[in-house]
Structure formats: C-alpha cells, structure tokens
Image (spheres, grey):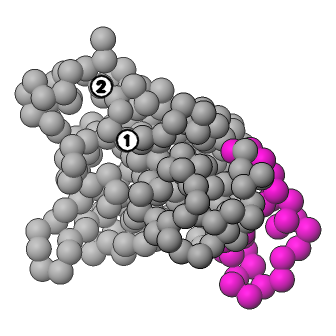
C-alpha cells in the first residue's frame, strides 16, 4: 500500500518567519485527507511541499511506493490559476499527464494513449479534445485539468481548492473521479474551505501554520478545535 510521510518539515521564504511546520504527518493509500484552515494557514504550501514544488528548509517527504518520485504525485489546481490564454487544445493539456512517464519528447506508447482516452472519458471531455482551453467554461477547464492528473495514474493526487466555484455537473464528475482514485489505492489530499467536503474525508488536518488537529472529521470539526485555527466563534461546526 502506498504511503507518504512528512518528518520535521519547516518552510520559510527567504529570511522571513516559518510559515509552515509539520513535525510528523502520515498519508496512507486508499484514503482521503482534507486540509482545512483559514487563508494563510499553510494548505497550499503543504501541498506544494508534498508535490516537490517547494523544498522545505528542514525535514523530508518520503514515499513508500515502487514508482520514482517524479511519477508519484499529480496535482490539480483551481482553473483560475491556469493561463487559459495558452494556445493549447484539451487533448494537448491531458497529454501532459504522461510527461512524467515519457518526458517532453518521448514517444507515446499504446498504454499512454489508453490512459489519456480513459481520463478524458471519466470526466466527459472527450468531445472537447480539439477545442482550446481559452474557449472553455471554468467548470470545463477544471475537468480538463483533472483529466490531466488522472492520465498520470499517480500514487498521490493533490487537489488545491479544485472543487471551488464549479457547476453542478462538473462537481459531480470530478468528485466521482477522485473517489475512484481513492478506491484504486491512491493517496488523495484535498485543500478546501468547505467543512461539508472535509467531513466526508477519512482524515482531516486542521492547519494554522502547523497542524493543530489531525484525525477523523468527528474529532477535528468540533468547536474547540476549529477555534484553535480560526478563532472563537468564527466558524460554526457542522450541525
């Protein structure tokens, strides 16, 4: 079973103060972990550390899987973080999900083409294959970015507010695809502001520059814990 461990992590920008500290965090395959906390609490920073996009000042992230790290992690950002003006078609964007396996100039094999086709079908963007990203709605773009991550067939799937502002159809398709990845045995980690989304996760990590609580939703999404991160009375617990 896949497993990722974070040990002794500290993150600072230049000579500024520590923005994230994680002494120990374990992520297990076949589970979903929700990251919640106020703006600036370290959710996106933690995802970038796991993805290898942001080297920590101290500590390490280790993966107990069989694939090398460059293939191990796929990440889905909000579509608003993507330059929709790039002259790329939907098919070209989804093909990028296979680059960690083949490189930019590597020849694609039958298994790559099958992974791409399956990923596009799962989030229903096959009929958009020749359209450019700039032509799509926000929900359609988010489905394309999700398809790119699915095509990678990674051990770890990271989502940074990937469900925010979606139309109902896109939200259902993406949620279903993410659940399928969890059932496949992938580690799923999702940053969210939505407590209802977090409540459905197997594990919740409440952040305020560091994990102030970690465990099942029923133990983390309670008034005392939420107040530790957001302040007293700011966030109402789920009813």
Q: Are marks 1 and 2 in contact (CB under 8 Å)?
A: no
Residue shown at 20%/75% (left/top)?
13
Q: Main secondary structure of the magenta part?
A: helix
- As helix, strand or loop, the secondary structure at mark 2 comes to loop
Q: Quadrant of residue 31?
A: top right
Q: Is residue 4 visible?
A: no
Q: Position of residue 118 (x, y in %)?
A: 80, 52
For marks 1 and 2, the one nearer the N-term is 1
Is 226 rendered above or below residue 57? above
Q: Left or right: where does residue 22 sit relative to residue 90?
A: left
Residue 85 colored magenta?
no
Q: Position of residue 137 (x, y in %)?
A: 54, 50
Reading the image, the residue beneath label 1 is 192
Residue shown at 30%/11% (left/top)?
239
Q: Position of residue 117 (x, y in %)?
A: 82, 56
- As helix, strand or loop, the secondary structure at mark 1 comes to loop
């Amino acid at each position: 079973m896949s497993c990722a461990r974070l040990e002794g992590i500290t993150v600072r920008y230049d000579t500024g103060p520590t923005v994230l500290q994680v002494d120990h965090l374990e992520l297990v395959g076949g589970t979903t972990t929700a990251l919640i906390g106020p703006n600036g609490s370290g959710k996106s920073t933690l995802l970038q550390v796991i993805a290898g996009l942001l080297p920590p000042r101290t500590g390490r992230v280790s993966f107990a899987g069989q694939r090398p790290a460059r293939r191990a992690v796929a990440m889905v950002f909000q579509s608003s973080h993507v330059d929709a003006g790039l002259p790329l078609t939907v098919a070209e964007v989804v093909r990028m999900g296979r680059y960690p396996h083949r490189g930019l100039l590597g020849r694609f094999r039958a298994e790559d083409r099958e992974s791409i086709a399956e990923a596009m079908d799962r989030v229903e963007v096959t009929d958009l294959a020749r359209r450019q990203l700039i032509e799509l709605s926000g929900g359609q773009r988010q489905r394309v970015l999700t398809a790119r991550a699915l095509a990678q067939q990674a051990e770890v799937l990271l989502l940074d507010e990937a469900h925010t502002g979606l139309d109902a159809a896109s939200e259902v398709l993406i949620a279903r695809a993410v659940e399928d990845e969890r059932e496949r045995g992938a580690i799923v980690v999702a940053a969210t502001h939505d407590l209802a989304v977090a409540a459905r996760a197997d594990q919740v990590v409440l952040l305020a520059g560091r994990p102030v609580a970690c465990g099942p939703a029923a133990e983390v999404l309670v008034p005392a814990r939420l107040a530790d991160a957001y302040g007293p009375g700011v966030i109402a617990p789920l009813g």
